Image: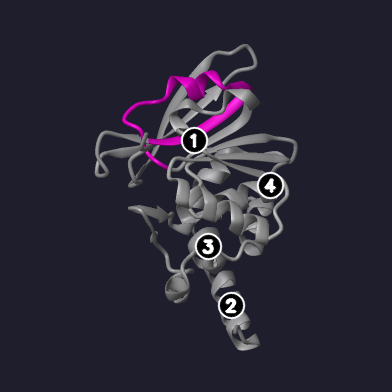
Amino acid sequence: MKTSEDKNTFRAQLERMVEDQIKRCGIQDKRLLNALLTVERHRFVEPEQRHLAYFDGPLPIGHGQTISQPYIVAFMTAALKIESQHKILEIGTGCGYQTAILAKLSTTVISLEYIKSLADSARLRLSNLGYKNITVHNANGQNGWPAAAPFDRIIGTAAPTSIPEKLVEQLAPSGKMIIPIGDTIFNQSLFIISKSKHGKVKIKRSLGVRFVPMVG
C-alpha cells in the first residue's frame, strides 16, 4: 500500500526530473512541461523499478524494450510542436508513458505496438489512469494506420533502418514526424520529416540516439 510519504517522495522526484533533466537542458514549452509534471513516470514501470523511475536514463520494460530517457521523450515531443487539435500516430506504445504525454497535448492519439503483451498492458494501464483519447492497437508500426490517416503528427519510438514511406504517406499536409533511423543501435539519429501544405517533404537530421530496433 502506498503511503503519503511515498507519494510525496515520487512528487519531489518528478519535479526534480522536470527541473534538472528537462528545463535545464533547454526545453521551455510550458504546455509540455505541464504535461510532464502531470504524468507520473513511476506508474509506467514495474514496482521493483519505481525507485529508478525518475532516473536520467532509459529503463527496461520487458521483451527487450525500454521506456525512454525523460529528456529524449521531452525533446522528441517538443520537436513536433503539438497543438491541442492535432491527431497523432505513435509507433511503439511500449509501456505507454510517451503515449500519455502526447494525450495531454492533443485531441487524439492512436498508438501501435507490435508486441501483443505490451499493447495489452499499456492499454489497460492507460485506461486505468483515466485516458479517454488514446487507442492502442497491436499492429506493425511500419504500416502505420491507414484507416485513420492522415495524421497531423507522427512519432516513432523504435528505429527502422530507413524512413518508412508508408508513414510519410500518412502524414497530413503541414504535418510533422520525428523518428529514429539507423541500421544498428550505435548508428542512429533522430530525423524530423516535415510536409508542406502542398505536400512537399523536407527531411532534417537531428540528435544522435539509441533506440531499440523497430520489429515487424
**Which of the two discs, 4 and 3, labels the residue nearer the N terminus?**
3
Looking at the rendered structure, the kind of residue marked 1 is: Ala
For the question of whether residue 96 can be seen, the reply is no
Q: Is-magenta flag for residue 62?
A: no
Classify the position of the N terminus by image quarter.
bottom right
Is 43 left or right of 57, judged from the image as shown? right
> Cα distance, mark 4 to mark 3?
18 Å
Label 4 vs label 1: CA separation?
A: 24 Å
Classify mark 1: residues with Cα within 10 Å, few (<14), some (14-19) or many (20+).
some
| Helix, strand or loop at mark 4 | helix
* In magenta stretch: residue 174: yes
Which stretch is magenta? 158-180
Q: Which residue is mark 4?
A: 105
Kind of residue sitting beneath label 2: Ala
Residue 163 at x, y = what percent? 40, 25
Give the amino acid type for the residue marked by disc 4 in the picture.
Leu
* Residue 24 against residue 74 in the figure, above or below: below
Give the image location of residue 137, x and y in percent.
56, 40
Q: Nearer the viewer, residue 137 or 23?
A: 137
The dot on residue 139 is 1
